[in-house]
Image: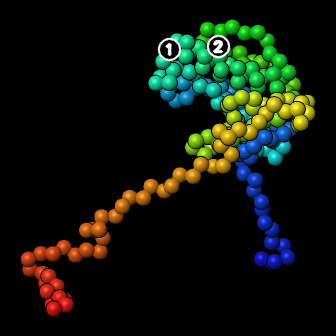
Amino acid sequence: MYSTKTATTVVSEGNYMPVGINENITLKEVNVKKTDNGRDFLEIVFENEQGQTATMTEWKNEKNMWIKTDADLQARDDQQFGRILQVLDAVKGGHNDFEGSSFVDMINWAKEQFADGDNDPVRLKVNFDKKGYTRVSSYGVFIEPMSVAKEESQIKLWKSDLLERPIKADDEKPKDPLTENSTPVTADSNTGADDLPF
């Protein structure tokens, strides 16, 4: 039976945390995973009070066209480890000392650190990536404990933060004017000579 008196509207807020600075966020899970291709990565998942999530994923840095020297690679590794320590400091209030020689050692150590003890609620910056997916921001201060007063927060929204989903135009292929609604002309067919205006 259908009735205007009992009809309802379900408002869905989506599964992903909104972009911007979110408060009272909790650490949901930390995973060390491997892709089908054999690439190791660290996945840190945060959740808000509505059950919406935002993910931070860290991959092994490798030399490429932007990372050319060993010094460049070490600088990227230091930045990456700094992001992970920023999360540990906010969620756990600190971290133990660590020195490891491989990416796998580092992500396994991080997972152990996150698993130890209680987690504090945090303030977290979320933005869009270039493909339009939400993610935890990875630049500057992006996380801090909720114990930091809002007016003293170090988390800032920058011009470079994508706070609107990037719009990608549809790829349109031009139509071939000779194939659309055209009739092939042959020597035997009427060429339309009767349609001439003179």
Q: Decide if residue 88 is on the left or right side of residue 57.
A: right
Question: Where's residue 119, x and y in %?
Answer: 85, 27
| Quadrant placement of the N terminus | bottom right
Whether residue 198 is visible: yes
In the rendered structure, which amino acid carries the disc numbered 1?
A: Thr
Q: Residue at x 72, y 44 (%)?
A: 19
Q: Residue at x 84, y 73 (%)?
A: 6
Q: Residue at x 57, y 21 (%)?
A: 60
- The residues bearing labels 2 and 1 have C-alpha atoms spaced at a distance of 22 Å
Mark drawn on residue 32 = none
Asked which colour scheme the image uses, the reply is rainbow
Q: Decide if residue 47 is on the left or right side of residue 67.
A: right
Question: Where's residue 71, x and y in %?
Answer: 55, 12
| Other-residue count near label 2 (Cα within 10 Å), few / some / many at <14 / 14–19 / ≥20 | few
> Which of 2/111 is in front?
111
Q: Decide if residue 64 is on the left or right side of residue 161.
A: left
Which residue is denoted by mark 2 in the rendering?
105
Name which quarter of the figure residue 156 lies in. Answer: top right
Q: Decide if residue 144 is on the left or right side of residue 132.
A: right
Q: Residue at x 51, y 55 (%)?
A: 169
In the rendered structure, which amino acid carries the disc numbered 2?
A: Asp
Which residue is denoted by mark 1 in the rendering?
69
Q: Residue furthest left?
A: 187
Q: Earlier in the sequence, mark 2 or mark 1?
A: 1
Question: Where's residue 100, x and y in %?
Answer: 65, 9
From this view, report whether residue 166 is shown above or below residue 55: below
Whether residue 114 is visible: no
Question: Where's residue 51, x and y in %?
Answer: 79, 44
> Which of 76/43 is in front?
76
Name which quarter of the figure residue 198 lies in. Answer: bottom left
Under tag 1, what secondary structure?
A: loop
